[in-house]
Image: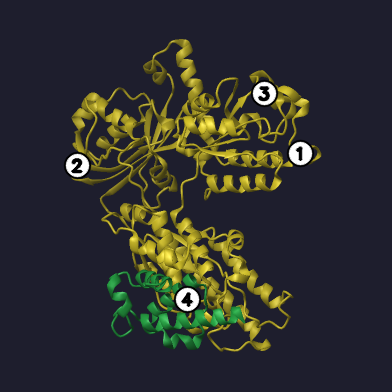
Amino acid sequence: MKLIEALEAVKRTPQHQSAVLQVHLACGFTPLHFLTFLDAHLRHQFPDRKVVVRTGLFGDLAGNLERLENEPFSAVAAVMEWPDLDPRLGIRRLGGWGPGQLHDLIGNVRDQAARISDILERIGRKGAVALALPTLPLPPLALTPTWQSSSFENHLREAVASFAAQVSGFQGVRIVSSQRLDQLSPPSARFDVKSEVNTGFPYSISHADVLAGLMARIIRNRLPKKGLITDLDDTLWKGILGEDNVEGIAWDLDHYAQAHGLYQQLLASLAEAGILIAIASKNDPALVEEAFQRAKPILPRERIFPLEAGWGAKSESVSRILQAWNIGADSVVFVDDNPLDLAEVKAAHPEIQCLAFPRDDESSAYQLLQDLRDLFGKQSISGEDAIRLESLRASRVAAEATRSQGTSPEHFLQQAEGKLTLSFAKDSPDPRALELINKTNQFNLNGKRHTEASWNEYLSDIKAFLLLASYEDKFGPLGKIAVVAGRQEETRLWIDRWVMSCRAFSRRIEHGCLLYLFRKFNAEEATFDFVATTRNGPLQDFFAGLMGKPPSGAFSISRWLAEEKCPKVYAQIQEHPRE
Amino acid sequence: MNDVQERLIKCFLAVFPQMGRQEVSSASMETVEAWDSVATITLVTVIEEEFGIQFGTDALERLVSFHSIIEYLQELTKAREAGGSA
């Protein structure tokens, strides 16, 4: 983006009356064009928000961060450069570069890094902090020629690396990848000495643009895709199983098939992190099973669900997989080497992201791995990630058992030995609650999302309550699958958020939650901040079951109606003791 | 209106979004309230980007109005052409 384009974007974007995204830019330099680029990129990332970017005082990064402890914000963009750790590491101050000062300088950098670390730990609890570590070169103050890395320089970099390792573990703090920054903004083209000397703004225009773009992405914290559907032949492995047989497929260096091995390795890693992996392949199902048994790919058979092998159209296999996963097509990536199959799937499921597996092109295959990591990247692995696949499998087993035994859903629930555990802890809210609110679409009261800051602010209301529900039955645990957030005013409950994972449908968990809320808070009526979305049909069906028709806007339900209309909940309900 | 003027007007309108198109040709630091030191730096950078040039530090003192910037850009163009044909 050119500066004039950023200025146009900031000018053009309508400041409509939507929720405000208040971002604080904390830096020690004159923010100038970086502020413009950050504003423009944030508007691009948050088209439905009114973006407001505020700045602090020149030359005082730590102070600017410290002051945020008492100020409201949605997110912070903290940009650290060497002079923020010691002004002698910049070119606007003349504090001396003498050899005798270097030792003191290292100590000073460590002290300042420790101070900033303490502040980040505190403000990270309030909301998201995107942090950029020093991106500019060190000035020529070490004794060695510039082509040699000095002990002084290495001690400085060690101090920053230790700082980064520490703060990256803090809640809310996310660091800009220096590797990605190096790819997009070559280090030699970042520092604008003339601008730094004359105006206190140290970045070249292109560097300001790239860094602001990455920080806006970090603040956006896009939800990762949930599932990947892959082809087999010349994709998961090299070779055509139907022609080459099990002996003829490969994914290693010896067979010039390393790209396929790396692809499998990445998929196995994604599966371990809770991403759903399925196969859609035009192949003989028995032969595919044999290939997994005998050839033992890096991506093991047990990590794949479902495996769709047959001779029908790929789009039909994809439809069945989406049904088994019960997730939207827009959360799914499809990888295949065949352009025709990619086009056919894209035509049938336009929301799926279709990616080509490059044939005999290691560089492009490596790029694909990076693209997949970007699409599926997440902050951490939750307990739910670990059990997602098993609970989906268990759901299918349960559904098949009901069908094959001819038992009714009523009978199935009766003998499922369900256990619904409800937690009301809101002081240190489980991050899973916010994750569910921000990723659930189908059973979602109104589609409203939260940033970490707005979520914490919402829960800080003394009248606010938070219900986080976990469920398990004899088919296995589903984990933490539902969230209700609201406020109590005497005998009325105001339900502001209600989401439930699609994995938890058909177990009457929603009925159990509603009835328990009435009982726990001794409430007589509940008012729901309902908004119809294009995807919350299952939630509308639930309320239609209680009220006789789907809701059309905010509405209330009495305790009497809930108790009258809710079917019997067989799951044993227990409240989790407060920690 | 020539191409240089048109491109410069675009730069002014990007930096001073409140300014009407008719006001640009008479704009100067004295007449435009929003034209402060930060706006000067932004304007200089946008013009440098648009025209693929670098202003010298001494030139900044001359960039005080639309008119003076046009003059400077025309001088620069002539100097370039003279250098190119030499």
The answer to whether residue A61 is above or below residue A181 is below
Percent of width and height locating residue A503: 44, 31
Residue matched to label 4? A28
Furthest-front residue in view? Answer: B85
Q: Amino acid at mark 4?
A: Gly
Parent chain of label 4? A
Q: Residue at x 72, y 74 (%)?
A: A149
Parent chain of label 1? A
Answer whether labels 4 and 3 touch (C-beta < 8 Å).
Answer: no
User: Which secondary structure lies at badge 2?
Assistant: strand
Disc nearer the start of the sequence (3/2) = 3
Residue matched to label 3? A288
Label 2 and label 1: CA atoms lie apart by 64 Å
Disc nearer the start of the sequence (4/3) = 4
Q: Is residue A206 visible?
A: yes
Q: Quadrant of residue A422?
A: top left
Parent chain of label 2? A
Furthest-right residue in view? Answer: A254
User: Which secondary structure lies at badge 4?
Assistant: loop
Colour chain A appears in: yellow
Q: Amino acid at mark 3?
A: Val
Residue matched to label 2? A492
Parent chain of label 3? A
Q: Is residue A357 left or right of residue A198?
A: right
Answer whether labels 1 and 3 touch (C-beta < 8 Å).
Answer: no
Q: Amino acid at mark 2?
A: Arg
Disc nearer the start of the sequence (4/2) = 4
Label 4 and label 2: CA atoms lie apart by 49 Å
Label 4 and label 1: CA atoms lie apart by 50 Å
Q: Which chain does the green colour mark?
A: B
